[in-house]
Amino acid sequence: MFWHLLHPLSEIRVALSQIEGVKDARTSMQELIPEYSFIPDPVRLSLLGMTQSQLAMDVRYGFLGSRASIYREGDDEYNIFVRYPENLRDSREDLEYASVLGRPLISMGYLDQRVVSNTISRKNQARMVTISCDVSGRSLGEVSSDVTALLREIDTSGFRYEMGGEMEDQKETFMYLGIAIMVAAALVYMVMAGQFESFLEPFIIIFTLPLAFIGVVLGLFVTSTSLSVMAIIGMLMLAGIVVNNGIVMVDYANQLRRSGKEIKTAIVEASTTRMRPIIMTAATTVLAMFPLALGIGEGAETWAPMAITIIGGLFVATVLTLVVEPCIYVIFNRK
């Protein structure tokens, strides 16, 4: 079983070290130690009138020792262990020719030599071997995708593998941030529903969020940036930024409708009048994020995905808000 496990581990470790961005690939079974197992011969033991348990106990007492007595000196007590001298238990030959009931041990069976790991790890009561590495020069998401593709190509029949460490933490973080984005959108909708005293108009405004996510995808694709925790944080920020343009436009269109203008005339005039402040607001945010998106300065590359996400999402959302949102406003208010 050990050798059957060791072969795919070595294959995976070598293949893992060849992935770009992977440094110092290693396994928990790289540190191996020799192990000797004595296999008794039942025929020989029966001829000598011995049992395997008697043989095992005698060998154990000889090499590990047994407490024969206690030595007392004043108030101190010392256990007295009896076993073979050190010069008779340091090599394989010493074990083979150890005296057991007046006979050499090798005459009662044979020794089986193999190498084993010096540590045994378990998870959920199942034995586990860890293959770990460091990541440098590439994002964790890109390396994780390559590792997953690698494991699909290697024959791992009879074994089960799981991603752990930072990959597992990143997956859990993505899940919680996704929930945070949905909660943020719901809270924004609830606030706008209370302010507008309507369930329809906040829905028209919240429609800018999918438009912003289109820009997020385009921004990450054009800059060849992988989806990361910082990028998702940028999406979370967009949930509160991009709705501002829609609020300004829809609120002004409602004021014009209350003054007696038709739906189409009101939204066209609102889009034309509010276009300048909408563009100014978006431009200031985009320009403020631009140096950060370039990754200039020490540690700036960590925050660059967030800036790219905000720039792409806000740019596309602003352009499409001036075109798509007026159409949605007319359609929903006519119905």
Image (cartoon, helix red, strand yellow):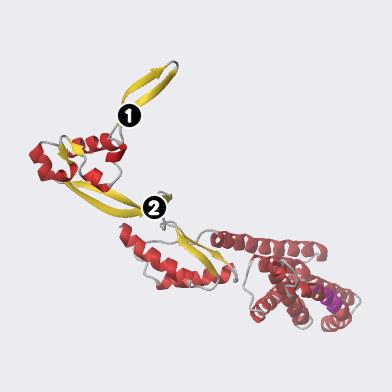
Instruction: Please state the horizontal and vertical placement of residue 116, each as a whole percent of the image.
Output: 34, 53
- Element class at badge 1: strand
* Residue drawn 48% across the image and 73% down it: 18
Classify mark 1: residues with Cα within 10 Å, few (<14), some (14-19) or many (20+): few
Q: Give the vertical position of 157 relative to 85 (above or below).
A: below
Q: Give the vertical position of 119 relative to 196 (above or below).
A: above
- Which picture quadrant has residue 177? bottom right
Is residue 334 at all visible to an observer of this figure?
A: no
Q: Which residues are magenta?
A: 278-285
Is residue 83 at all visible to an observer of this figure?
A: yes
Which amino acid type is marked by label 2? Arg
The mark tally for this picture is 2
* Residue drawn 39% across the image and 71% down it: 154
Instruction: Please state the horizontal and vertical placement of residue 16, each as a whole percent of the image.
Output: 47, 69
Q: Residue furthest right?
A: 259
Please identify the quadrant where the C terminus is shown: bottom right
Q: Is residue 332 magenta?
A: no
Please identify the quadrant where the N terminus is shown: bottom left
Instruction: Please state the horizontal and vertical placement of residue 157, each as a whole percent of the image.
Output: 35, 66
Instruction: Please state the horizontal and vertical placement of residue 300, each as a whole percent of the image.
Output: 72, 68
Marks 1 and 2: CB-CB under 8 Å?
Answer: no
The residue pinned by badge 2 equals 127
Which amino acid type is marked by label 1? Phe
- Which picture quadrant has residue 291? bottom right
- Is residue 236 or residue 211 the one in the foreground? 236
- Element class at badge 2: strand
Q: Is residue 282 magenta?
A: yes
Q: Is residue 255 left or right of residue 189?
A: right
User: What label does residue 81 carry, if any?
Assistant: 1
Q: Residue furthest left?
A: 47
